Image: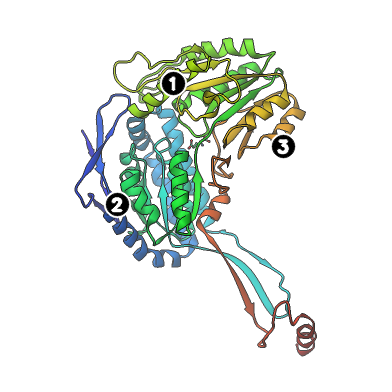
Amino acid sequence: MTITVRNFINGELVAAQSGKTFQSINPATEEVLAVAPDSTSADVDAAVQAAKSAYNAWRLTPAPRRGEILYRVAEILKERKEELSALMTQEMGKIIAETRGDVQEAIDMAYYMGGEGRRLMGYTSPVEMPNKFGMALRDSVGIVGLITPWNFPVAVPSWKILPALIAGNSIVWKPGEDVPASAEMFAQAFADAGLPAGVLNVVNGFGPDAGGPLVAHPDVRILSFTGSTDTGIAVYTKAASLGKKVTLEMGGKNAIIVMDDANLDLAVDAITWSAYGTTGQRCTATSRLIVQKGIKPRLMEALVAKAKSIRMGDGLDPNVDMGPLVNPKALEKVSSYMDVAKSEGVKILTGGAPADIEKGYFFQPTLFDGVEAGMRVEQEEIFGPVLSVIEVADFAEAVKVNNSTRYGLSSSIFTENVNDAFRAIRDLTTGIVYINHGTTGAEIQFPFGGTRGTGNGMREAGQAALTSFTEWKSVYVDYSGRLQRAQIDTEDVLSRELTSD
Ligand code: UN1
């Protein structure tokens, strides 16, 4: 049965004003899972108006009360975890164990940000004048616009929605066009938890017609975007011309470094999981393997065997290890890189073609050998189950190769040498660094994001998320009853005030 998704505006489920819809397709079966509103600027505007009307009451709701609603969101997501995970697997293809993890990440974030309702720490500092008090407070901003991708239909939106809410903002969210049904079920948890109407609004649709008007809307002061680099830069450019604050989370070309002294079995398991988990469709996925010469032959042999043993199929089947790519466009893009690899003289050790499965957008786990730093397959984000292997002589070369891409999200090193581990922490120039663990699996307590072309210096998750969704308000309270001019009256005010008390 096809699900009918609606926009969620001012607490009501509504169709697009134009009445137009688009389809959401199950990438494992190619069946239509849902139809959703194909929204335009009229829908975005209605959602922004709803967010505007709801903002004042929400910002004035004490933050601990806002936090209690977030705790209820966590509880509801726990109750609905199976149902929501199964829907997500059907809608975007990753295996059920992974969609469960996706929902769990949102649950973790809901508890974390719920707790922020009783913190949202500002600070006080001593001031220069007597009988005067100073403090810095985190203030809400107003209406935030969120644009999120399909690969983490719940976790990535949760990184944005939950901190934005605890800070007292109201929201217009445009989910990825491949996952409208998952977005609707996620948004429903907020409504059921008691979030007032209009505080969280959802507008479905595509970038040009729905995302563009959200970015350009004069009442939206903050934008948070996760997705492709090209779109992210377009969002940034437009938003900058309008003086808006933007948080960007874009591509990755993440590497695992394996040194000769690494624990081989551990490295093989971690590489397989990070490269082929989520069918390679994570911004944190490992797409480069930088391997020291000595261990390489044994590592390659083990990795080829592992890649060949991966069971592909419908992610609802618990025996399946890897689901399909998200849509035909993704299949086409990943396939096109096989020609790039051949033209660059790369050797395909295993995989290299769509899988021989009747339905669905499946692509075989693929291993490229003989890749050299600077090649297109080594530099460009493929976003599929494709791993490029680059051989290096030593630690210094490994670090250099790791740091030489336009992206800077995540990196990792496998070594049993504590000195190399600490040197890696010091020298790898990515936003996330792992020691003896693959490049995926960040936890929500810590800042998430990357350097160079991955982002714009902002971070999600952890305390850093609050920077994205609050403004600082510095407050001075002068209780001297006299004019005290900071930086000017320091000497005489001081002697006067100290003798008058
Ligand atoms: C993403 O790919 O956009 O660190 C997010 C991880 C997950 C989040 C990935 N916790 O792999």
Q: Residue at x 29, y 51 (%)?
A: 8
For this rendering, which residue is in front, 290 or 34? Answer: 290
Callout 3: CB less than 8 Å from ligand 1: no
Location of residue 89 by image quarter: top left
For this rendering, which residue is in front, 61 or 71? Answer: 61
Q: Secondary structure at mark 3?
A: helix
Query: What's the mark number on residue 8?
Result: 2
Residue 109 percent location from the top left of the image: 49, 46
For this rendering, which residue is in front, 387 or 342? Answer: 342
Location of residue 44 by image quarter: bottom left
For this rendering, which residue is in front, 45 or 25? Answer: 45
Residue 434 percent location from the top left of the image: 63, 32
Q: Are marks 2 and 3 in contact (CB under 8 Å)?
A: no
Whether residue 224 is visible to the viewer of this picture, yes or no, is no
Residue 380 percent location from the top left of the image: 51, 29
Q: Which residue is mark 1?
A: 321
Query: For the view shown, which residue lies furthest in the left direction?
Result: 19
Location of residue 439 by image quarter: top right
Find the distance from the CA under tag 2 to the CA under tag 3. 46 Å
Q: Give the mark toward the camera: 1 or 3.
A: 3
Query: What's the mark number on residue 309?
Result: none
Between disc 1 and disc 3, whose residue precedes? Answer: 1
Q: Secondary structure at mark 2?
A: strand
Residue 212 falls left or right of residue 470: left
Query: For the view shown, which residue lies furthest in the front direction?
Result: 343
Q: Which residue is mark 3?
A: 426
Find the distance from the CA under tag 1 to the CA under tag 3. 35 Å
Q: Are marks 1 and 2 in contact (CB under 8 Å)?
A: no
